[in-house]
Image: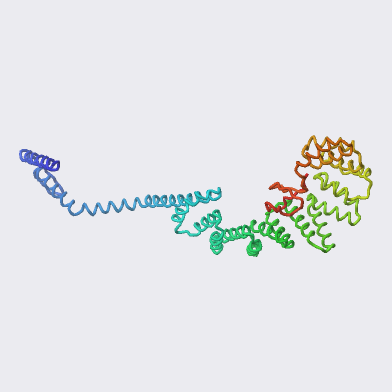
């Protein structure tokens, strides 16, 4: 309806214009190059309309195509930029998704990781290595060790993911209780040029576990050269390995060499100094052994050092031993344990009053000391104070035993010394209980 009305209006305007021009024809005159043209306005308008019709019929479409082509070329950079932004956006989205999945695995959120798995596989359909990494870690988190081992093996075959795959295999071998297989994989990586620091530390731990002492020392020295360990840790670990090696040999000369080398390597390692002092005492070099223990008492006053010091002169009378002990205690006069060890020496010399006073002083600081409570019970019994003896005996019965060694990482108390903690397997964390 609107179209009909519009057409009628247009025709009406044309008719009115034609009628007006017929009543007012006017004239148009033009001179050009000696030619003169004179005609009416209506003719000029008619010529203009005819020219426009010809132009529209034959030239409008080609010109429109040319215009579009020019605009297309002009906007090519804009389109390329838009496409690049879209591609980058897709890359960011899929790597963000992968990051969420790996973060969930690292946080132990296995359920969230499982939910993201399908989307990750779909997004990385063109990059199987990325999905293999995620799937392997997910299988390990789900305790599916067989599948995880299979996936890590695939990763180990590809050059780009070889180290990641090998590290996963080594970790699973250790979890499965197959240290010999883990060590074999480590040695394969050790044979390569410039092995990664984690390869050196893993190999060292496994070589210690398998009691391959010479290889362990060689690996440790290589790790130190690559700055995997600082100087202090290197000395501590090397001395620890040498002591373990000495404990396992039956050759007296070799044992002596290893113990002395351990003491020279790290004179701050308590076990190394204790072993060296004991060795010197066996050789009759009591003075040298006393000097070593006195020096050690400055930095590590503990029951083990006291016992080693007393063992140097077992034949000495108990009263003389009390006086002799003062030389050791003077090296560290502020040590809390001074009162306990002097009380023990006094107790052996039957100096009941002196021992009791020292123990009361020590118990004021360490009220749950099993050793001190047992000594107090012994003193009370010697003084025929049955009530006090029973009371101290009951307290000692419920008090925790005082271990000789403790792991500085997991805090596990132990009665035997180890290069690596048997609980948390951390290297070089054994220390004498102070």
Quadrant where the C terminus is found in the figure = top right
Residue drawn at point x = 20 percent, y = 53 percent = 59
Q: In this picture, is 146 found above or below 344?
A: below
Residue reaching furthest front? Answer: 386
In this orientation, does residue 20 appear?
Answer: yes
Side of 185 where 399 appears, left or right = right
In this orientation, does residue 336 appear?
Answer: no
Residue 117, horizontal then vertical, whole percent: 47, 53
Residue reaching furthest left? Answer: 23
Residue 180, horizontal then vertical, whole percent: 66, 63
Quadrant where the N terminus is found in the figure = top left
Asked whether 373 or 336 is in front, the reply is: 373
Q: In this picture, is 372 found above or below 186?
A: above
Residue drawn at point x = 52 percent, y = 55 percent = 134
Residue 188, horizontal then vertical, whole percent: 63, 65
Asked whether 67 or 228 is in front, the reply is: 228
Q: In this picture, is 153 found above or below 365?
A: below
Count all numbered tags in the image, as a single digit.
Answer: 0
**According to the image, what is the colour scheme of the structure?**
rainbow
Residue 292, horizontal then vertical, whole percent: 85, 49
Side of 197 where 390 appears, left or right = right
């Amino acid at each position: 309806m609107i179209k009909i009305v519009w057409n009628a209006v247009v025709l009406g305007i044309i008719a009115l214009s034609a009628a007006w021009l017929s009543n007012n024809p006017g004239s148009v005159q033009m001179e050009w190059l000696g030619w003169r043209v004179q005609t009416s306005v209506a003719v000029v308008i008619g010529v203009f309309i005819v020219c426009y019709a010809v132009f529209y019929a034959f030239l409008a479409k080609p010109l429109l195509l040319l215009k579009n082509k020019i605009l297309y070329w002009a906007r090519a950079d804009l389109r390329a930029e838009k496409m690049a932004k879209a591609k980058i956006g897709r890359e960011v989205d899929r790597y963000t998704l992968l990051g969420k999945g790996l973060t969930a695995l690292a946080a132990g959120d296995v359920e969230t990781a499982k939910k993201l798995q399908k989307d990750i596989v779909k997004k990385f359909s063109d990059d199987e290595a990325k999905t293999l990494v995620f799937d392997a870690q997910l299988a390990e988190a789900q305790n599916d060790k067989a599948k995880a081992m299979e996936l890590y093996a695939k990763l180990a075959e590809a050059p780009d993911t070889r180290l990641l795959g090998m590290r996963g295999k080594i970790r699973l071998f250790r979890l499965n209780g197959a240290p010999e297989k883990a060590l074999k994989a480590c040695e394969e990586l050790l044979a390569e040029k410039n092995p990664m620091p984690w390869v050196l530390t893993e190999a060292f731990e496994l070589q210690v576990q398998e009691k391959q002492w010479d290889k362990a020392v060689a690996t440790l020295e290589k790790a130190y050269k690559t700055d995997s360990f600082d100087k202090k840790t290197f000395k501590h670990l090397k001395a620890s390995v040498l002591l373990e090696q000495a404990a396992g040999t039956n050759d007296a000369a070799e044992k002596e060499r290893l113990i002395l080398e351990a003491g020279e390597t790290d004179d701050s390692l308590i076990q190394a100094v204790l072993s060296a002092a004991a060795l010197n005492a066996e050789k009759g070099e009591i003075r040298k052994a006393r000097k070593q223990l006195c020096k050690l008492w400055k930095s590590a006053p503990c029951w083990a050092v006291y016992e080693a010091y007393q063992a140097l002169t077992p034949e000495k009378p108990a009263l003389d031993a009390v006086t002799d002990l003062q030389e050791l205690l003077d090296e560290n006069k502020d040590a809390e344990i001074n009162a306990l060890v002097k009380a023990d020496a006094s107790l052996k010399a039957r100096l009941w009053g002196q021992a009791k006073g020292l123990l009361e002083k020590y118990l004021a600081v360490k009220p749950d000391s099993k050793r001190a409570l047992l000594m107090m019970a012994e003193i009370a019994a010697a003084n025929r104070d049955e009530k006090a003896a029973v009371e101290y005996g009951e307290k000692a019965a419920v008090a925790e035993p005082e271990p000789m060694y403790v792991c500085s990482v997991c805090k596990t108390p132990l009665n035997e010394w180890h290069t690596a903690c048997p609980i948390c397997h951390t290297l070089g964390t054994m220390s004498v209980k102070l």
